[in-house]
Amino acid sequence: MSQDYKEITENGLWKQNPILVQTLGMCPTLAVTTSAVNGFSLGLATAFVMAASNGSIAPIRRWVPREIRNPVYILIIAALVTVTDLVMHAYVQELHQVLGIFIPLIVTNCIVLARVEAFAAKNPVIPSTLDGLMMGLGLTFVLTLLGALRELVGKGTLLSGIDLALGPAAKQFVVTVLPDYHGFLLAILPPGAFIGLALLIAARNWMESRKAASGTQTAPSEPAMAHGH
Amino acid sequence: MSENIARHSVQTAALMIVFTLVGTLLLVLAFFSTRGPIAESERKAKLALLEQVLPTSLHDNDLVTDAADVPPNDELGNRDATLAYRARMAGQPTAVILEAVAPDGYSGDIKLLIGVRADGEITGVRVLAHKETPGLGDYIDIAKSNWIKNFDGKSLAKLPEDGWKVKKDGGRFDHMAGATITPRAVVKAVHKALKYFAAHRDQLFAAPAVKESAT
């Protein structure tokens, strides 16, 4: 039962990365990652929900009977998501508008329920919260990377829209990497999301297989079995 | 045996109710503590938007609260009642901001905000919402190009009836090759909105202000 914190962190960020390895929660992943800022923001919101839901379900795990554990978990997750939605609406209104329906849809992101079921339902509060947070950050990292990739190829910029999150003063942080770039629309449109994600997964697999081949003792991670929507 | 099952069911149901109540309580608390900030940030966002189509030098009143109901009509293309924001200087009407809908864009409605001076001259137009193709028809959005500024200063008096078209159709408005449906819809909607304003000007300024609905 005493899960090593380092292992939890590594699992969330890399070894069991929710997107690259578990391929869970594909719907928001593919839809929102049109820019680095969008991916990062939705990732953070999801990470917060995951840490909070894991953290609040772990202490009550023994009182929830098996028969109603799913409705109870979903109820808690939905309440947390609604709170997140309201808070974002109140304090980062423009970002809230950009992310739109995908904030409420965090409820249906199966990675959240998956971590509650697989981890928080069996472990104490602190490791559970850490697991939720790290899985969430692993998700954030991939969403940001995928968003940056699509934004760079599609529009030639990085961090566009950062002013929506940090106020108009942040507009200066927008980096135009390729000036006078006419854009490559495909990267921004849905196919770009699939292709970009495939490239990221392939890159991860390549890195892992190289690591395995070079003789280090890391066991190859299990192939993704579960598929989300 | 069956008694056990019944008791177990009741217990489980009771537990579920407890969780539901706790969840509801959490939501109630969150709702009430964010209601104020949400209303305030929506008001700010709206004001920022209104100020894009109407220079602040044209009014000294609070635009958001001085709004009149506009019933659904064909000229503005709105299917639901919208608001007309009145700008006044020392009580005198100077301009009005109308919400219009272009129903014939390439994909779905294009919602517009149109600022018109009392003399019928456009102070500015902005696209509130659209679903046009990214990278193709979306140049009507100020975030993508300055095309929408073509409307600034135009009026029914300055531009004859047949000028209110894209150049491809013999009018005065530029468009990008390969994406004419979108600007055509916008030009048409703005033109119609100006006609609506010309016909209902006094009525618009005289109508009582509606209470901002608490959304």
Image (cartoon, coloured by chain):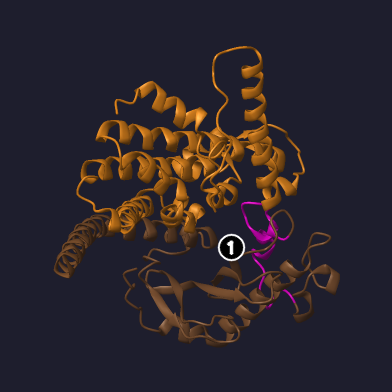
Chain colours: A orange, B brown
Rendered residue at 78%/75% (across/down): B163
Q: Is B167 on the left or on the right of B106, as rendered? A: right
- A140 in relation to B148, above or below: above
Start-end of magenta stretch: B137-159
Q: Is B53 on the left or on the right of A182, as rendered? A: left
Measuring from the top left, give residue A66's x and y in whole percent: 28, 53
The verdict on residue A97 being magenta is: no
Image quadrant in which you'd find residue B150: bottom right
Measuring from the top left, give residue B45's x and y in whole percent: 43, 57
Magenta part mainly helix, strand or loop? Answer: loop
Residue B199 seen in the figure? yes
Measuring from the top left, give residue B89's x and y in whole percent: 41, 68
- B157 in relation to A19, above or below: below
Q: Is B135 on the left or on the right of A163, as rendered? A: right
Quick one: A125 or A123, which is closer to the camera? Answer: A123
Measuring from the top left, give residue B82's x and y in whole percent: 47, 78
Q: Which residue is mark 1?
A: B126
Image quadrant in which you'd find residue A211: top right
Rendered residue at 54%/80% (across/down): B78
Count neighbours of disc 1 (C-alpha within 10 A) and say few if under 14, some if 14 to 19, many if 20 or more.
many
Q: Assign the N terminus of chain A to one quadrant of the image.
A: top left
